[in-house]
Image: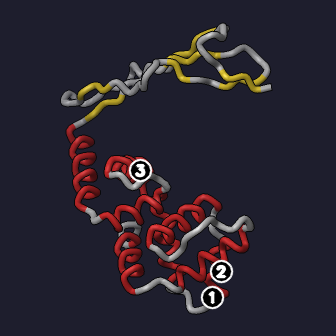
Amino acid sequence: MLTPLNENTDAAFDTEASFDSYDAPSDAHEVDATEEGSVDDVIVSDGPTVKRKAQRAIRLTPAIARRVLAEHAAVQDMDAETRRVLAGALGTDDTVEAVTISRLTAGRAGLTPLAELASLAQMSSPFAAMVEAMSMDRDVARRARATLVALGALNGAPPSKPEAVAAELAEAALGLTGTQRDTLDRLAAQVA
Protein backbone atom coordinates (compact mmCIF):
# COMPACT_ATOMS: atom_id res chain seq x y z
CA MET A 1 0.00 0.00 0.00
CA LEU A 2 1.32 3.46 -0.88
CA THR A 3 1.47 5.89 1.99
CA PRO A 4 1.87 9.61 1.31
CA LEU A 5 4.27 11.34 3.63
CA ASN A 6 2.96 14.26 5.62
CA GLU A 7 4.11 16.32 8.59
CA ASN A 8 2.43 13.93 11.07
CA THR A 9 4.32 10.89 9.80
CA ASP A 10 7.42 9.79 11.68
CA ALA A 11 10.43 9.72 9.40
CA ALA A 12 12.85 6.84 9.78
CA PHE A 13 15.67 8.90 8.31
CA ASP A 14 16.37 12.07 6.37
CA THR A 15 18.05 12.22 2.99
CA GLU A 16 19.79 15.31 1.74
CA ALA A 17 21.09 16.07 -1.72
CA SER A 18 24.57 17.49 -1.69
CA PHE A 19 25.67 19.85 -4.40
CA ASP A 20 28.66 21.26 -2.53
CA SER A 21 31.07 20.34 -5.31
CA TYR A 22 29.30 22.60 -7.82
CA ASP A 23 31.23 25.80 -8.50
CA ALA A 24 29.06 28.55 -9.91
CA PRO A 25 30.48 31.42 -11.94
CA SER A 26 31.58 34.35 -9.80
CA ASP A 27 28.79 36.55 -11.16
CA ALA A 28 26.05 34.03 -10.24
CA HIS A 29 23.40 34.87 -7.68
CA GLU A 30 21.81 32.30 -5.39
CA VAL A 31 18.06 31.91 -5.67
CA ASP A 32 16.01 29.97 -3.15
CA ALA A 33 14.38 27.23 -5.23
CA THR A 34 12.11 25.87 -2.54
CA GLU A 35 8.40 26.48 -2.64
CA GLU A 36 6.31 27.16 0.45
CA GLY A 37 7.49 24.59 2.96
CA SER A 38 10.87 23.02 2.59
CA VAL A 39 9.92 19.35 2.66
CA ASP A 40 8.89 17.52 -0.51
CA ASP A 41 6.26 14.82 -0.11
CA VAL A 42 7.64 11.41 -0.95
CA ILE A 43 5.59 8.29 -1.57
CA VAL A 44 7.08 5.13 -0.13
CA SER A 45 5.84 1.61 -0.68
CA ASP A 46 5.75 -0.89 2.22
CA GLY A 47 8.68 0.51 4.10
CA PRO A 48 9.75 3.34 6.31
CA THR A 49 8.55 6.73 5.23
CA VAL A 50 11.18 9.17 4.11
CA LYS A 51 11.35 12.91 4.59
CA ARG A 52 13.48 14.71 2.04
CA LYS A 53 14.52 18.28 2.60
CA ALA A 54 14.92 20.54 -0.41
CA GLN A 55 18.54 21.66 -0.16
CA ARG A 56 19.41 22.52 -3.74
CA ALA A 57 19.81 26.17 -4.67
CA ILE A 58 19.68 27.24 -8.31
CA ARG A 59 22.40 29.55 -9.58
CA LEU A 60 20.99 32.43 -11.60
CA THR A 61 23.57 33.72 -14.03
CA PRO A 62 23.20 36.91 -16.08
CA ALA A 63 22.87 34.79 -19.23
CA ILE A 64 19.93 32.86 -17.77
CA ALA A 65 18.30 36.07 -16.57
CA ARG A 66 18.65 37.62 -20.04
CA ARG A 67 17.11 34.51 -21.64
CA VAL A 68 14.13 34.57 -19.26
CA LEU A 69 13.56 38.29 -19.85
CA ALA A 70 13.86 37.92 -23.63
CA GLU A 71 11.39 35.02 -23.67
CA HIS A 72 8.95 36.94 -21.47
CA ALA A 73 9.17 39.96 -23.78
CA ALA A 74 8.63 37.77 -26.87
CA VAL A 75 5.55 36.11 -25.37
CA GLN A 76 4.20 39.45 -24.15
CA ASP A 77 4.55 40.88 -27.68
CA MET A 78 2.48 38.04 -29.19
CA ASP A 79 -1.09 38.77 -30.14
CA ALA A 80 -3.70 37.01 -28.00
CA GLU A 81 -4.59 34.40 -30.65
CA THR A 82 -0.97 33.36 -31.22
CA ARG A 83 -0.37 33.09 -27.47
CA ARG A 84 -3.58 31.02 -27.07
CA VAL A 85 -2.48 28.62 -29.84
CA LEU A 86 0.99 28.32 -28.35
CA ALA A 87 -0.53 27.68 -24.91
CA GLY A 88 -2.62 24.88 -26.41
CA ALA A 89 0.45 23.26 -27.92
CA LEU A 90 2.32 23.54 -24.63
CA GLY A 91 -0.63 22.32 -22.58
CA THR A 92 -0.79 25.39 -20.33
CA ASP A 93 -2.86 28.49 -19.62
CA ASP A 94 -2.61 31.36 -22.10
CA THR A 95 -1.25 33.91 -19.63
CA VAL A 96 2.09 35.52 -20.47
CA GLU A 97 3.70 34.01 -17.38
CA ALA A 98 2.40 30.46 -17.97
CA VAL A 99 3.42 30.43 -21.63
CA THR A 100 6.85 31.88 -20.81
CA ILE A 101 7.50 29.28 -18.12
CA SER A 102 6.30 26.44 -20.34
CA ARG A 103 8.43 27.62 -23.27
CA LEU A 104 11.53 27.80 -21.10
CA THR A 105 11.01 24.47 -19.35
CA ALA A 106 9.55 22.34 -22.15
CA GLY A 107 12.18 23.02 -24.81
CA ARG A 108 11.53 21.98 -28.38
CA ALA A 109 9.75 18.80 -27.32
CA GLY A 110 6.95 20.96 -25.90
CA LEU A 111 6.26 22.30 -29.38
CA THR A 112 5.93 18.85 -30.98
CA PRO A 113 2.14 19.24 -31.49
CA LEU A 114 2.77 22.23 -33.75
CA ALA A 115 5.12 20.26 -35.98
CA GLU A 116 2.75 17.29 -36.02
CA LEU A 117 -0.22 19.46 -37.01
CA ALA A 118 1.78 21.25 -39.71
CA SER A 119 2.74 17.84 -41.08
CA LEU A 120 -0.89 16.64 -41.01
CA ALA A 121 -2.06 19.80 -42.77
CA GLN A 122 0.32 19.09 -45.67
CA MET A 123 -0.80 15.49 -46.22
CA SER A 124 -2.22 14.68 -49.62
CA SER A 125 -5.05 12.44 -48.42
CA PRO A 126 -7.32 12.22 -45.39
CA PHE A 127 -6.39 8.55 -44.94
CA ALA A 128 -2.66 9.33 -44.81
CA ALA A 129 -3.35 12.14 -42.32
CA MET A 130 -5.39 9.80 -40.12
CA VAL A 131 -2.65 7.15 -40.17
CA GLU A 132 -0.14 9.81 -39.16
CA ALA A 133 -2.45 11.07 -36.40
CA MET A 134 -2.86 7.51 -35.08
CA SER A 135 0.90 7.31 -34.56
CA MET A 136 0.94 10.36 -32.25
CA ASP A 137 1.70 9.91 -28.58
CA ARG A 138 -1.45 10.36 -26.46
CA ASP A 139 -0.14 13.53 -24.78
CA VAL A 140 0.94 15.02 -28.12
CA ALA A 141 -2.50 14.22 -29.59
CA ARG A 142 -4.19 15.87 -26.59
CA ARG A 143 -2.09 19.02 -26.98
CA ALA A 144 -2.57 18.98 -30.77
CA ARG A 145 -6.31 18.92 -30.20
CA ALA A 146 -6.02 21.81 -27.73
CA THR A 147 -4.06 23.69 -30.40
CA LEU A 148 -6.82 23.10 -32.96
CA VAL A 149 -9.42 24.27 -30.43
CA ALA A 150 -7.36 27.45 -29.86
CA LEU A 151 -7.19 27.97 -33.62
CA GLY A 152 -10.98 27.63 -33.83
CA ALA A 153 -10.81 24.51 -36.00
CA LEU A 154 -12.39 22.26 -33.34
CA ASN A 155 -14.74 22.66 -30.42
CA GLY A 156 -16.49 20.50 -27.88
CA ALA A 157 -15.27 17.56 -25.88
CA PRO A 158 -12.76 15.15 -27.42
CA PRO A 159 -13.97 11.73 -28.56
CA SER A 160 -13.33 8.87 -26.16
CA LYS A 161 -11.76 6.46 -28.66
CA PRO A 162 -8.21 7.05 -29.97
CA GLU A 163 -9.31 6.24 -33.54
CA ALA A 164 -11.99 8.92 -33.39
CA VAL A 165 -9.47 11.44 -31.98
CA ALA A 166 -7.09 10.65 -34.84
CA ALA A 167 -9.86 11.05 -37.43
CA GLU A 168 -10.90 14.35 -35.84
CA LEU A 169 -7.29 15.65 -35.80
CA ALA A 170 -6.72 14.65 -39.43
CA GLU A 171 -9.96 16.19 -40.66
CA ALA A 172 -9.44 19.43 -38.72
CA ALA A 173 -5.79 19.78 -39.79
CA LEU A 174 -6.68 19.28 -43.45
CA GLY A 175 -9.58 21.75 -43.16
CA LEU A 176 -7.62 24.68 -41.68
CA THR A 177 -8.37 28.07 -43.21
CA GLY A 178 -5.60 30.24 -44.64
CA THR A 179 -5.35 32.39 -41.52
CA GLN A 180 -5.33 29.36 -39.21
CA ARG A 181 -2.69 27.70 -41.36
CA ASP A 182 -0.51 30.84 -41.33
CA THR A 183 -0.64 30.99 -37.53
CA LEU A 184 0.20 27.29 -37.27
CA ASP A 185 3.04 27.52 -39.80
CA ARG A 186 4.51 30.59 -38.09
CA LEU A 187 4.60 28.81 -34.72
CA ALA A 188 5.72 25.48 -36.22
CA ALA A 189 8.70 27.26 -37.81
CA GLN A 190 10.05 27.78 -34.28
CA VAL A 191 10.36 24.00 -33.91
CA ALA A 192 12.33 23.49 -37.11
The local secondary structure at tag 2 comes to helix
Comes first in the chain, label 1 or label 3: 3
Q: Is residue 73 above or below residue 25?
A: below
Query: In which quadrant of the rendered image does the N terminus lie?
Result: top right
Which label belongs to residue 130? 2
Comes first in the chain, label 2 or label 3: 3
Residue appearing at x 63%, y 76% in the figure = 168
Q: Is residue 115 above or below residue 120?
A: above
| Residue 182 placement (x, y as % from top left) | 36, 80
Query: How far is mark 1 from mark 3, CA to CA?
Result: 32 Å
- Foreground residue among 173 and 54: 173
Query: In which quadrant of the rendered image does the C terminus lie?
Result: bottom left
Q: Amino acid at mark 2?
A: Met
The local secondary structure at tag 3 comes to helix
Query: How far is mark 1 from mark 2, CA to CA?
Result: 6 Å
User: Disc 3 marks which residue?
Assistant: 102
- Foreground residue among 17 and 189: 189
Q: Is residue 37 above or below residue 135?
A: above
Q: How many numbered marks appear?
A: 3
Q: Amino acid at mark 3?
A: Ser
Whether residues under marks 2 and 3 lie with C-beta atoms below 8 angstroms apart, the answer is: no
| Residue 20 placement (x, y as % from top left) | 39, 19
Horizontal side of 176 relative to 13 (left or right) equals: left
